[in-house]
Image (cartoon, rainbow, N blue to C red):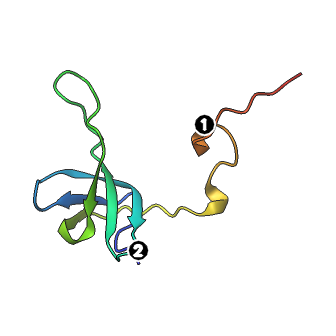
Amino acid sequence: MFEFGFGDELKDIVSGFKGVVTARAEYANGCVHYLLDPRKLTADGKAVEADWFDSRQLKQTKAKRINVTIESLPREGPQRGGRPTIAHP
């Protein structure tokens, strides 16, 4: 079961890394990991990469849960992670 939701802001208590939950995974051995997107730029203007963290070392700093359902996801196109849909005349 997932403790945190999509959109929640979390902090890794070990490294201090902060970010927004954009993905989560539960493994067969019972470990739960969250992908945190820091939503910030480096000094040279590049995006800081998202990273995975074990749930046991995460603390919620801001609740902003986003309800994601299968019905709310795009069925086609690049938003779904697939190739863009091309309309032919």
* Residue 6 at least partly seen: no
The quarter of the displayed image where residue 69 is located: bottom right
Which residue bears the numbered disc 2?
28
Which element carries disc 1, helix, strand or loop? helix
The quarter of the displayed image where residue 85 is located: top right
Identity of the amino acid at label 2?
A: Ala
Q: Give coordinates of residue 2: x percent, y percent.
A: 39, 73
| Residue in the image at 32% along x and 72% along y | 31
Viewed as shown, does residue 7 lie left or right of 88? left
Q: Give coordinates of residue 58: x percent, y percent.
A: 21, 65
Viewed as shown, does residue 4 lie left or right of 54? right
Neighbour class for label 2 at 10 Å: few (<14), some, many (≥20)?
few
* Residue 88 at least partly seen: yes
Q: Tell me how many marks there are.
A: 2
The quarter of the displayed image where residue 23 is located: bottom left
Using the numbered discs, state the Cα–Cα distance from disc 1 to disc 2 in whole angstroms.
Answer: 30 Å
Q: Give coordinates of residue 40: x percent, y percent.
A: 26, 37
64 to 80, vertically: above or below: below
Neighbour class for label 1 at 10 Å: few (<14), some, many (≥20)?
few
Q: Residue 78 carries which label?
A: 1
| Residue in the image at 19% along x and 58% along y | 11
Identity of the amino acid at label 1?
A: Pro
